[in-house]
Image: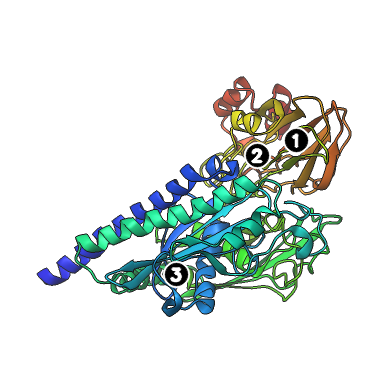
């Protein structure tokens, strides 16, 4: 290698490291300035930098796969409608169209061009979840997308630095919490601006006129790394099926994963048709979580960008539950979409035995609490609660941890200060983890009531209530979730319900599946579980000692 070649490699590495720092600062700016607690506290967002062709070069670690990978597919759609020659300094584009962005109306994606030396050199994009967009509200009950809220096509949020006041008035007139919506849109624009400013500083420091040549090198290396990782796998096709709760009846999801030399194809043929309720999944969200599942096991040390993602293709039957077409209702698309990694893992477990975790709660439990019409204290809030993950190769599952979404649980103090609610109980759900040589992660019990004993509404989008997370290699299933009132009255896992005045809502999130025979669990480790209150003495005897 010549000195010039060494210098080029070093320069590329330095710029790559700086890009990672820039997009992470972009994400942190979004969290610091967001108004919605689900973004500010739970990290329900994405952030990334793109080349002038709309190809994602780098993503922030902070954020969710559904947002990140769907956003990666969204930016070229922005450019198809607004080519570079139509963009000016200070322009900011926005949409919440589910079929352009990340799959439902509550997610707003913002794209901003970066100008350096009088030309566009890159784009920054970000996505965050806004708690309310009008309509029926965030939930699974709508019959089509028109009922779900305000849908904004790709348009200018800012034009040459001036805010589009007509658009902002339209948004604020159609949502239940206008100040939060306004603040969140500003936070999206602000985080892109922070990224753009840092990138211009980087280019100036290296005396570069453009980013595209180094961006192309980054993508080429990522694609080559992914190609090598796939080539090391056994070729073939593996199939798996999984039943999930659905809305009013269980649904079956089917998957085939084909490993073919330098690519992996994921096909969901045979999966359930589209639903008449809002649990349908646009294809971009399906692609996002299917590709994330592959990346968890294949080339996980390779950057997640347009180069590595190009090696994975995803298809689903048109207008099925996993390729819902306009105007299907899609608000609760995560309730089905976040189950896809477990489905893909079921295929890959056959190709890569011993390397795949057991099933977990998977779908986050993110109820929307809001006031009843005419309440003295109007409110809407969207906290995050999580179940347990499945046991992992060589390790127990993680308790009350969001996987695959990666969002954090919203702190109780934040939930109570932003809404007239009291969290009376929040604790590990004993014996919820699937028994095994490696046990699953535990779920949790949450008990919520109104501070003034008034009635309130809860929109539920939960899964794993009827179908428990399954174990692997002889490990047992985790406990399914439970939704009820403190009186004992059972509620559905999905749909809008009213919690009566004076009553409390109790959520028991699912536990993850175990791995390996429970009889093989280390007895000293089992004893520690009992002492810690994670496993009861009865379960230790019945599920482990007598297994």
Q: 331 above or below 364?
A: below
From the viewer's perspective, tell me whether residue 317 is left or right of residue 107.
Answer: right
Task: Pick the residue in front: 92 or 286.
Answer: 92
Question: How far across and down, in percent of the image, does residue 509 sit?
Answer: 71, 38
C-alpha separation, residue under disc 2 versus residue under disc 3: 31 Å
Residue at 75% in and 64% down: 145
From the viewer's perspective, tell me whether residue 9 is left or right of residue 138.
Answer: left
Element under disc 1:
strand
C-alpha separation, residue under disc 1 versus residue under disc 2: 9 Å
Among the 4 quarters of the image, the one containing residue 528: top right
Residue tagged 1: 507
Residue contact between numbered discs 3 and 1, judged by CB atoms under 8 Å? no
Among the 4 quarters of the image, the one containing residue 198: bottom left
Residue tagged 3: 306
Residue tagged 2: 385
Residue at 72% in and 75% down: 317
């Amino acid at each position: 290698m010549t000195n010039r070649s060494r210098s080029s490699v070093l320069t590329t590495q330095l710029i790559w490291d700086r890009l990672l720092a820039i997009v992470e600062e972009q994400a942190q700016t979004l969290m610091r300035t967001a108004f919605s607690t689900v973004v500010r506290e739970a990290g329900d967002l994405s952030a990334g930098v793109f080349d002038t062709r709309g190809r994602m070069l780098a993503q922030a670690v902070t954020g969710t796969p559904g947002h990140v990978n769907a956003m990666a597919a969204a930016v070229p759609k922005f450019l198809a409608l607004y080519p570079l020659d139509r963009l000016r300094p200070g322009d900011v584009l926005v949409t919440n169209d589910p079929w352009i962005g990340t799959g439902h109306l509550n997610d707003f994606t913002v794209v901003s061009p970066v100008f350096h030396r009088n030309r566009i050199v890159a784009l920054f994009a970000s996505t965050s979840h806004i708690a309310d967009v009008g309509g029926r509200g965030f939930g699974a009950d709508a019959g089509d997308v028109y009922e779900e809220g305000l849908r904004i096509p790709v348009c200018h949020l800012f034009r040459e630095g001036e805010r589009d006041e007509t658009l902002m008035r339209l948004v604020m007139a159609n949502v239940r919490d206008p100040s939060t919506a306004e603040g969140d849109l500003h936070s999206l624009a602000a985080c892109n601006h922070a990224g753009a400013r840092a990138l211009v500083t980087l280019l100036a420091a290296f005396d570069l006129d453009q980013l595209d040549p180094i961006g192309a090198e980054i993508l080429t290396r990522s694609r080559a790394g992914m190609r090598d990782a796939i080539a090391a796998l056994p070729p073939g096709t593996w199939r798996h099926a999984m039943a999930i709760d659905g809305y009013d009846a269980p649904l079956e999801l089917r998957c085939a994963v084909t490993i073919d030399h330098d690519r992996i194809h994921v096909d969901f043929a045979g999966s359930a048709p589209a639903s008449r309720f809002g649990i349908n999944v646009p294809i971009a969200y399906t692609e996002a979580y299917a590709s994330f599942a592959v990346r968890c096991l294949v080339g996980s040390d390779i950057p997640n960008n347009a180069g590595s993602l190009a090696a994975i293709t995803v298809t689903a039957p048109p207008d099925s539950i996993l390729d819902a077409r306009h105007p299907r209702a899609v608000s609760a698309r995560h309730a089905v979409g976040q189950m896809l990694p477990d489905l893909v893992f079921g295929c890959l477990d056959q190709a890569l035995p011993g390397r795949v975790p057991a099933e977990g709660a998977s779908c986050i439990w993110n109820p929307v609490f809001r006031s009843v019409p005419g309440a003295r204290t109007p409110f809407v809030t969207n906290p995050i609660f999580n179940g347990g993950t499945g046991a992992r190769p060589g390790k127990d599952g993680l308790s009350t941890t969001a996987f695959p979404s990666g969002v954090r649980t919203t702190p109780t103090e934040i939930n109570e200060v932003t809404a007239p609610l009291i969290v009376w109980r929040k604790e590990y759900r004993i014996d919820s983890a699937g028994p095994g040589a490696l046990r699953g992660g535990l779920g949790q019990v949450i008990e919520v009531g109104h501070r003034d004993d008034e009635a309130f509404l809860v929109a539920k989008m939960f899964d794993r209530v009827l179908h428990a997370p399954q174990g692997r290699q002889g490990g047992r299933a985790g406990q399914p979730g439970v939704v009820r009132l403190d009186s004992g009255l059972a509620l559905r896992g999905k749909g809008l319900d009213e919690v009566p005045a004076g009553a409390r809502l109790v959520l028991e999130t699912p536990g993850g599946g175990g791995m390996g025979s429970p009889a093989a669990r280390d007895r000293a480790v089992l004893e520690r579980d009992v002492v810690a209150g994670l496993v009861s003495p009865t379960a230790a005897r019945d599920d482990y000692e007598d297994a």
